[in-house]
Image (cartoon, helix red, strand yellow):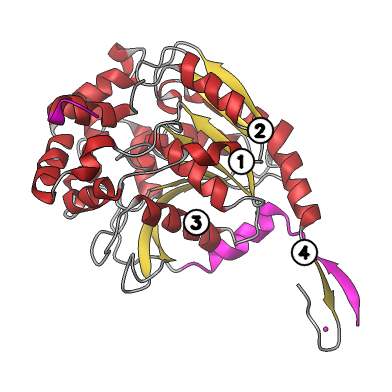
Amino acid sequence: MRFSCLQALIFALTFSSPVGGFLVHHQPTALASHRIYAASTMPDLTFTPPDMTGIQEQACIDAAKRMTRVAVPVPSDISPSGSVGISYIHWPADKSKRSKNSPPLLLIHGFDSSGLEYRRLGPKLAAKGIDTYAVDILGWGFTQYDGVSSFSADSKVKALENFVNTMFGKETPFCIAGASLGGAAAIELAAVKQGVCAGLILIDAQGFVDGVGPMAKLPTPLAKLGVGVLKSIPLRNSANQMSYYDKETFATEEAQVIGRLHCLRDGWDDAMVSFMQSGGFSPSSKIPLIQSPSLVLWGRQDGILEGKEYANQFVETLPNARLVWIEECGHVPHLEQPETTASAIAEFFNSDVETQVTSVQQSQPTYLVGAGFVGA
């Protein structure tokens, strides 16, 4: 059994282990509803997009320019102010290609990464008519660090849930995709948003290995030493090499630089320690509970998570799932084969997700509006 991406390297390299009136049906289209909520969000005016000095990849430069941050409400035990800044990248759907029942898609990055991970996939999904948001998980990417008390796994999921509620609305259908450890976060979010989540997409995802292993029990000084190694260039280079099938083309120095940008921000170390000591995500027991249609995408040559074991296990465990193999591809299909990955997701939207959206909308309550009464 192998751990996901950088987790495996942490264990191996650091610790040698891992009103009566008329009836109104509350059935807004996904497009109209989530636009209403997005327009009412509070931007984080303290946010500065990531510095792209020296970066040559145009897709990354374009994604960084699109990145912004929004204030998301959270419980006071996460932030005493009652909110945290969550960064995200939005690629609006091509209106000429978008179906009226196509919900927004939330992309969740992998372990200690950022929304820049989806710099190649996001534009391709938007071009196929999918309104696409790549969100940073609290404590990773370019989210707020100052004034945040907890970056635990539970805090990360709660921030994701409230990001969805803030941007799209509590009852608006949406779809989630998660890559690697982002798959674990996506599973937990889908479980929280049962009945509203219209589709789950798992990309070489971790779901059957709970927690972070021995690091959860380390005292803070040792944990800080461990996370210090985690952002080191040698370890990041190793992770870079492990992630791709075509290493010569994709496992470049620039790819390592892009993947490490967020680690250089003040507060990253403490945020990582907070997550590790929380014990990590626990998605395995939630997988059989996911009722929405699910798409499992897997790089045929994934050298981190064995597809024959884990991809098939997802299909066997999820109540409504199908598997698509991505050929000539390692652990990150969204980076190595973005066009093929986008096409598979678009087909899933057309055949499964939009049908689920219609079902969700038909099951939403009917409101009686008349002279003095609004019922829900």
Q: Which residue is mark 4?
A: 26
Report the magenta residues as a range: 14-41
Q: Position of residue 180 (x, y in %)?
A: 40, 31
Q: Position of residue 233 (x, y in %)?
A: 14, 30
Between the C-alphas of marks 1 and 2, the distance is 7 Å
Give the vertical position of 209 relative to 42 (above or below): above
- Crowding at dot 4, Cα within 10 Å, few <14 / some 14-19 / many 20+, comes out as some
Report the residue marked by disc 2. Answer: 319
Instruction: Look at label 3 and name its amino acid.
Output: Glu
Q: Nearer the viewer, mark 3 or mark 1?
A: 1
Could you tell me which secondary element the residue under label 3 belongs to? helix
Of mark 3 and mark 1, the one earlier in the sequence is 3
Q: Secondary structure at mark 4?
A: loop
Q: CA distance from mark 2 to mark 4?
A: 28 Å
> 179 or 207, which lies in front?
207
Inspect the magenta stretch and tell me whether residue 178 lies in it. no
Q: Which residue is mark 3?
A: 161
Bin the neighbour count of mark 3 within 10 Å (Cα to Cα): few under 14, some 14-19, many 20 and up: many
Alpha carbon distance from label 3 to label 4: 22 Å
Q: Residue at x 55, y 19 (%)?
A: 312
The dot on residue 290 is 1
The answer to whether the residue labelled 1 contacts the one labelled 2, judged by CB atoms less than 8 Å apart, is yes
Specify which label sits upstream in the sequence, 3 or 4. 4
Q: CA distance from mark 4 to mark 1?
A: 24 Å
Residue 251 visible to an observer of this rendering:
no
Sequence order check, earlier mark of 2 and 3: 3
Which of discs 3 and 4 lies nearer the camera? The answer is 3
Q: Residue at x 41, y 36 (%)?
A: 119
Circle 1 packing at 10 Å, graded few (<14), some (14-19), many (20+), is many
The amino acid beneath tag 2 is Pro
